[in-house]
Image (tube, rainbow, N blue to C red):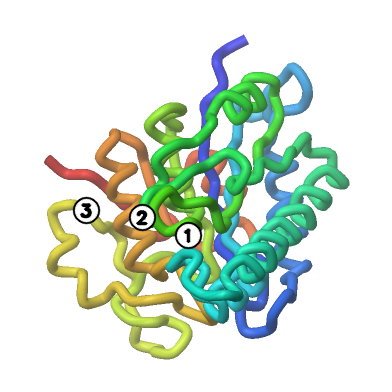
């Protein structure tokens, strides 16, 4: 049996939830994604029927679940006021509730997914991840399971607590697991010259690299929709550039029908490719 290729997938919070309505799942979109994953993931002991042999690690954003709570309580800033502890509990509960819904659906569709809770295995220092207990994550991949992580609030050695994005987690894990590709599926089809949900003349940027990022900084803003306490599109791009520097393919693309399967089957250039150029 040939070795399996590891691919990291990120499902954007705005893709799988309605970021404008608290605690609202986009069930139709989520079900379509899970169906496409099921079509691509190898059966037990085999491959996909197309010569592919894949292992997945999935991360997802919080969308309308933890982000409104984190914004209200300023959880990313740490334990800064009397209600910070309450805010941490509510934020973590909201993030893990969404994760449980996603894992439940994947298991119902026959995918061997398991939840990995970042607040229980990650530590930060002044907003940056400094340690992740990677052994259970790697063991789950080696066993043929699909670990599902998520943007979360975690303990911080300086602030007391902070909020970390899925991209931060994937960047840190890439140093140890080194996937073949990192695919970020979002509500929109990639990175645009302006917000495509508000500006009809917004144009897709096919490639962002270390060579052109300075010229494109003005195009990178916050979230394209709803509340995002982790830095929006600018933060996503810069995190992925750090992953690309490790020699790993990265792409931000649409999570609409068909794209997940096409990307996992090997298509490139469906959205915005993030590349490291020397």
Q: Return the residue at label 3.
A: 209
112 over 166 or under it: above or below: above
Outermost residue on the right side: it is 108
Place of residue 98 in the rendered image (x, y in percent of width and height, measured from the top left) = 72, 61
In the rendered structure, the answer to whether residue 168 lies left or right of residue 97 reads left
Q: Tell how many labels.
A: 3
Q: Give the position of the C terminus as an image quadrant.
A: top left
Find out whether the residues at labels 1 and 2 contact each other: C-beta distance under 8 Å: yes
48 over 128 or under it: above or below: above
Q: Quadrant of residue 224?
A: bottom left
Q: Work out whether mark 1 precedes mark 3 in sequence or the reverse, and give the earlier one.
A: 1
Nearest to the observer: residue 140 or residue 213: 140
Disc 2 element: loop
132 over 185 or under it: above or below: above
Residue at image position (56%, 81%) is: 72
Disc 3 element: strand
Q: Residues within 10 Å of mark 2 (few under 14, many from 20)?
A: some
Q: Work out whether mark 3 precedes mark 2 in sequence or the reverse, and give the earlier one.
A: 2
Is residue 3 shown to the viewer in this render?
A: yes
Q: Work out whether mark 1 precedes mark 2 in sequence or the reverse, and give the earlier one.
A: 2
Find out whether the residues at labels 1 and 3 contact each other: C-beta distance under 8 Å: no
Give how far apart the Cα atoms at labels 1 and 3 are.
29 Å
Residue at image position (83%, 50%) is: 104
Residue at image position (54%, 81%) is: 226
Give how far apart the Cα atoms at labels 3 and 2 are.
27 Å
The label number, if any, that marks residue 162 in the structure image:
1
Find out whether the residues at labels 3 and 2 contact each other: C-beta distance under 8 Å: no
Disc 1 element: strand
Place of residue 125 in the rendered image (x, y in percent of width and height, measured from the top left) = 38, 49
Residue at image position (50%, 58%) is: 161
Outermost residue on the front side: it is 82
The label number, if any, that marks residue 126 in the structure image:
2
């Amino acid at each position: 049996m040939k070795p399996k290729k590891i691919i990291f997938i990120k499902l954007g919070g705005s893709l799988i939830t309605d970021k404008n309505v608290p605690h609202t799942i986009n069930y139709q979109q989520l079900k379509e994604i899970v169906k496409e994953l099921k079509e691509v993931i190898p059966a037990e002991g085999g491959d996909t029927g197309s010569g592919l042999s894949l292992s997945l690690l999935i991360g997802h954003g919080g969308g309308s679940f933890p982000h409104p709570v984190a914004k209200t309580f300023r959880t990313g800033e740490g334990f800064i006021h009397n209600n910070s502890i309450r805010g941490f509990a509510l934020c973590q509960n909201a993030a893990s509730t969404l994760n449980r819904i996603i894992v439940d659906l994947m298991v119902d569709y026959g995918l061997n997914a398991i939840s990995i809770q970042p607040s229980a295995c990650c530590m930060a220092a002044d907003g940056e991840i400094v340690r992740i207990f990677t052994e259970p994550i790697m063991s789950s991949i080696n066993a043929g399971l699909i670990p599902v992580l998520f943007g979360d609030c975690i303990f911080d050695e300086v602030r007391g607590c902070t909020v970390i994005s899925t991209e931060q987690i994937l960047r840190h894990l890439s140093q140890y697991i080194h996937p073949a590709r990192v695919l970020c599926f979002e509500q929109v089809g990639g990175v645009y010259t302006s917000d495509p949900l508000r500006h009809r003349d917004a144009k897709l940027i096919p490639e962002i690299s270390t060579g052109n990022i300075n010229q494109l900084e003005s195009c990178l803003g916050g979230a394209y929709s709803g509340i995002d306490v982790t830095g929006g599109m600018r933060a996503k791009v810069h995190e992925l550039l750090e992953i690309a520097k490790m020699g790993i393919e990265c792409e931000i693309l649409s999570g609409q029908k068909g794209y997940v399967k096409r990307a996992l089957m090997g298509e490139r250039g469906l959205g915005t490719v993030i590349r490291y150029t020397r």
